[in-house]
C-alpha cells in the first residue's frame, strides 16, 4: 500500500512535477536513524495545483501559500515547495521568501544550511540527488556549510551546527568554524536558542560536543556567558585530576546524559549538570598551597539564575535548578561520612527531586588516581532514600491535627508546623510528635508573652 507521500508524488508526477524526500529525513535514513518526521518538497507545479492534489489525498493545512508550506491533518508529513530566501534583517525570521517551483534541485538545495541536510531522494524512484557532497560528509562525519553568502544570513545555523555535531558525534569543518566566528547571535530569540540547546542536551550521547564546538567558534559569550570563565579555572588536582572546571563540567554533562531516562525531568537535570559549578567562578582561591572553592554551591546561585533565565521561561525548570545546585555536593559527602538517618532525610526532603540527587552524585562523582569508577556508596544512598520514602509515607502531624487539639492558629503557626515537620523527618511517630509539637507551641507562646 502506497504511503501518503507516495500518493502525493504519483499525483504530482501526473501533473508534470516531481517529489523528493528532503532534509533530516534523508540524512537520518542514511545514518540509520529512525525519523518519523517526514519532509517532502514538490517541484515543477504551481502552488494551487499542489493544493488541489492535497485536497484529494487528505485535509490540507496551509501555513501560507506565499511560503509554499503545507501539511495534512492527522499526518506526520510536512510538504513544501522550492523557494528563494533573501535576508532583510538579523533575526531568524527576517527573510523575504519567494516560492519558485522551477528553481531546480540544485537551487532548492543551495538554500539549506549544511551539506548533510541538502540531500534529496525521489519519493517514487529512490534516486539520490546530492549536489553538495552530503553523502561524503556523512561518511567522513563532517558538518559543512553549503554557501558562505547565504549561510551567514541565519545566525541560528551556528547553534544548529553545534547541536548536529553533538547529536551525531561529527566534527565541524574548519572553514565552517571560521565562518561561524563572525556571526552575531544577539538577535536570536531565547526560544530558538533553547530549542537547539534542548536537542543537544537531550539527544546527544556526548552533549559536551555542543559546547566544545561553540568554544571553537568563539560563540559562548552571547548566550552561554557564564561558561567561558570556567575555561582555565583551576581546581584541586587531588579531587579533580581531570583538569579545570570547564573540563570537569563537560565530563559531568556527558556522564549525566547516561541517566536521562532515570530522572524526573531530563532537561532540567541536564541544566543542573551544566550549571552546578558556576559558583567556582566567584569562590575559587588558593590557601596553604591548595585550591579551594568554599561555598561555591550557594554563592554561585546568582550566576546560575542569570544563566537559566537567559535561556528559558519555564518556571519549574528555573526552580528545580536553583533548588538542586546548593544540594549537589551533599549526596557524595553523605555517601562518604555515613551520617544519621535524620541528616539524609533532611537532604532528600529539601530536594526538588530526591532520587535525582543520587543520579547527579553519580555524574558528579569524585575521581581519584585516574579511576573512572563512582567512588560514592550508591547502595547507601539508595538505602537511605528508601528510608526517607517510608518515613514520609507514615501518618504525620498536620495543621488540622493541631487545631483539633485546641491550638489556635496565629502568626507563629508556620514555625510550629516546621517543628512538627522536623519531628516527622526524625522518624517520630505521629502521637508522640503531636504531644511534642503542642508542648513546643505552648513554650513558644509563653516566651512570646513574657517578652
Image (cartoon, rainbow, N blue to C red):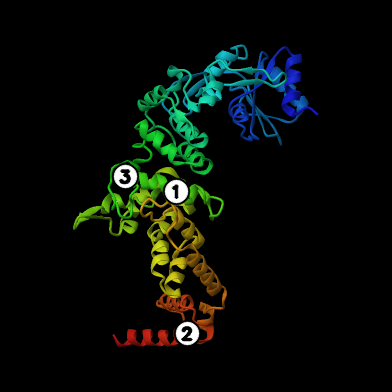
How far apart are labels 2 and 3 at the CA level?
A: 53 Å
Q: Are marks 2 and 3 in contact (CB under 8 Å)?
A: no
Quadrant in which the N terminus appears:
top right
Q: Which mark is residue 441?
A: none
Q: Quarter-wise, where is residue 328 in the image?
A: bottom left
- The answer to whether the residue labelled 2 contacts the one labelled 1, judged by CB atoms less than 8 Å apart, is no
Q: Is residue 129 above or below residue 417?
A: above
Would residue 267 appear left or right of 343 to someone viewing this image? right
Instruction: Specify whether 287 is left or right of 31.
Output: left
Q: Residue at x 43, y 54 (%)?
A: 321
Q: CA distance from mark 1 to mark 3?
A: 16 Å
Q: Quadrant of residue 400?
A: bottom right
> Mark 2 — residue?
407
- For mark 3, does the 10 Å Cα neighbourhood hold few (<14), some (14 to 19), or many (20 or more) residues? some
Q: Left or right: where does residue 344 sit relative to residue 133?
A: left
253 vs 62, nearest the viewer: 253
Residue 243 image point, x, y percent: 32, 46
Q: Is residue 437 above or below residue 114?
A: below
How far is the residue under mark 2 from the one under mark 1? 44 Å
Residue 147 is situated, as x and y percent measured from the top left of the image, at 46, 17
Residue 32, by quadrant, is: top right
Residue in view at x 47 percent, y 67 percent: 349
Mark closer to the chain start, 1 or 3: 3
Kind of element beneath mark 2: loop
The percent position of residue 332, horizontal first and vertical second, equals 41, 62
Q: Which residue is mark 3?
A: 230
> Marks 2 and 1: which is nearer the front?
1
State which tag comes first along the sequence, 2 or 3: 3
Q: SS at mark 3?
A: helix
The circle drawn on residue 271 is: 1
Amino acid at each position: 500500500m502506497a504511503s501518503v507521500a507516495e500518493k502525493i508524488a504519483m499525483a504530482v508526477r501526473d501533473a508534470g512535477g516531481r517529489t523528493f524526500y528532503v532534509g533530516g529525513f534523508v540524512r537520518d535514513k542514511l545514518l540509520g536513524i529512525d525519523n518519523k518526521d517526514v519532509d517532502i518538497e514538490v517541484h515543477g507545479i504551481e502552488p494551487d495545483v499542489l493544493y488541489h492534489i492535497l485536497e484529494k489525498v487528505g485535509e490540507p493545512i496551509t501555513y501560507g501559500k506565499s511560503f509554499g508550506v503545507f501539511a495534512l491533518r492527522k499526518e506526520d508529513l510536512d510538504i513544501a515547495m522550492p523557494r528563494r530566501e533573501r535576508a532583510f534583517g538579523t533575526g531568524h525570521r527576517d527573510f523575504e521568501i519567494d516560492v519558485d517551483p522551477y528553481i531546480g534541485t540544485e537551487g532548492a538545495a543551495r538554500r539549506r544550511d549544511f551539506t548533510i541536510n541538502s540531500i534529496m531522494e525521489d519519493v517514487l524512484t529512490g534516486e539520490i540527488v546530492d549536489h553538495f557532497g552530503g553523502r561524503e560528509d556523512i561518511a567522513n562525519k563532517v558538518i559543512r556549510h553549503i554557501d558562505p553568502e547565504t549561510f551567514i544570513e541565519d545566525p541560528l545555523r551556528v547553534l544548529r551546527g553545534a547541536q548536529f555535531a553533538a547529536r551525531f558525534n561529527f566534527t565541524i569543518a574548519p572553514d565552517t568554524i571560521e565562518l561561524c566566528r563572525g556571526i552575531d547571535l544577539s538577535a536570536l530569540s531565547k526560544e530558538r536558542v533553547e530549542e537547539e540547546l534542548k536537542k543537544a542536551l537531550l539527544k546527544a550521547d556526548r552533549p559536551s560536543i555542543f559546547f566544545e564546538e561553540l568554544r571553537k567558534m568563539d560563540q559562548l559569550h552571547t548566550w552561554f556567558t557564564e561558561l567561558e570563565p570556567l575555561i582555565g579555572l583551576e581546581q584541586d588536582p587531588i579531587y579533580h585530576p581531570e583538569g579545570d572546571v570547564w573540563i570537569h563540567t563537560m565530563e559531568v554533562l556527558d556522564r549525566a546524559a547516561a541517566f536521562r531516562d532515570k530522572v524526573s525531568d531530563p532537561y532540567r537535570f541536564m541544566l543542573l549538570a551544566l550549571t552546578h559549578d558556576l559558583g567556582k567562578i566567584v569562590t575559587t582561591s588558593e590557601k596553604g598551597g591548595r585550591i579551594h572553592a568554599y561555598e561555591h554551591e550557594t554563592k554561585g546561585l546568582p550566576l546560575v539564575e542569570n544563566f537559566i533565565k537567559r535561556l528559558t521561561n519555564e518556571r519549574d525548570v528555573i526552580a528545580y535548578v536553583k533548588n538542586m545546585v546548593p544540594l549537589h555536593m551533599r549526596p557524595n559527602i553523605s555517601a562518604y561520612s555515613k551520617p544519621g538517618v535524620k541528616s539524609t532525610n533532611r537532604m532528600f526532603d529539601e530536594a526538588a527531586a530526591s532520587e535525582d540527587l543520587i543520579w547527579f552524585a553519580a555524574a558528579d562523582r569524585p575521581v581519584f588516581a585516574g579511576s573512572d569508577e563512582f567512588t560514592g556508596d550508591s547502595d547507601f544512598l539508595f538505602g537511605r532514600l528508601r528510608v526517607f520514602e517510608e518515613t514520609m509515607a507514615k501518618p504525620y502531624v498536620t495543621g488540622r491535627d493541631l487545631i483539633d487539639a485546641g491550638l489556635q492558629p496565629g502568626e507563629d503557626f508556620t514555625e510550629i508546623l516546621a517543628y512538627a515537620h522536623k519531628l516527622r523527618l526524625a522518624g517520630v511517630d505521629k502521637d508522640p510528635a503531636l504531644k511534642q509539637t503542642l508542648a513546643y507551641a505552648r513554650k513558644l507562646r509563653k516566651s512570646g508573652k513574657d517578652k
